[in-house]
């Protein structure tokens, strides 16, 4: 899909939030280091942030402009990254 960055979350052992798995896909890891660091520190509750919205609905969620989305929590982490949109989708196993 030619995504510049991708990340996998999992539900926490308590089942109350999404946490990082440490699984990443990069086109250029160095470019996204600040974004990665912020993501590793961020936990998402249901309905909060792009991952939390997808978790709450059980459906894919697309944000066409992360700069305009008030619920995209990490949009100001590193303004030098050239990511304009985001997609989250649940994988239930």
Image: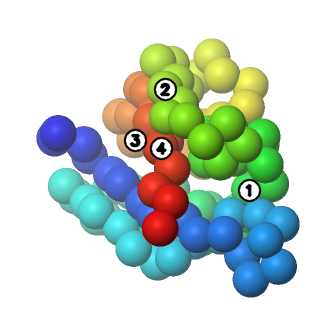
Comparing 24 with 55, the one in front is 55
* Residue 1 in picture, x, y percent from top left: 17, 39
Q: In this view, does 69 lie above or below 22?
A: above
In space, the residues marked 2 and 3 are separated at their CA atoms by 19 Å
Q: Nearer the viewer, mark 3 or mark 4?
A: 4
**Are the two marked residues, 1 and 2, in contact with CB atoms closer than 8 angstroms?**
no
* Residue 49 in picture, x, y percent from top left: 70, 42
- Disc 4 designates what residue? 89
Q: Quadrant of residue 18?
A: bottom right
Query: Would you call the spot at circle 3 few (<14 residues within 10 Å), some (14-19), or many (20 or more)?
Result: some
- Disc 2 designates what residue? 62
Comparing 12 with 38, the one in front is 12
| Residue 34 visible in rendering | no
Q: Which of marks 1 and 4 is in front?
A: 4
- N-terminal label among 1 and 3: 1
Query: Would you call the spot at circle 1 few (<14 residues within 10 Å), some (14-19), or many (20 or more)?
Result: many
**Are the two marked residues, 1 and 4, in contact with CB atoms closer than 8 angstroms?**
no
In space, the residues marked 3 and 4 are separated at their CA atoms by 22 Å
- Disc 1 designates what residue? 44
- Disc 3 designates what residue? 81
* Residue 50 in picture, x, y percent from top left: 62, 39
In space, the residues marked 1 and 3 are separated at their CA atoms by 22 Å
| Residue 62 visible in rendering | yes
């Amino acid at each position: 899909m030619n995504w510049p960055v991708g990340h996998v979350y999992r539900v926490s052992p308590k089942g109350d939030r999404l946490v990082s798995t440490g699984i990443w896909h990069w086109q250029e890891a160095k470019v996204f280091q600040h974004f990665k660091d912020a993501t590793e520190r961020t936990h998402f509750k249901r309905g909060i942030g792009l991952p939390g919205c997808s978790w709450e609905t059980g459906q894919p969620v697309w944000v066409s402009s992360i700069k305009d989305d008030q619920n995209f929590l990490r949009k100001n982490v590193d303004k030098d990254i050239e990511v304009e949109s985001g997609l989250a989708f649940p994988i239930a196993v």
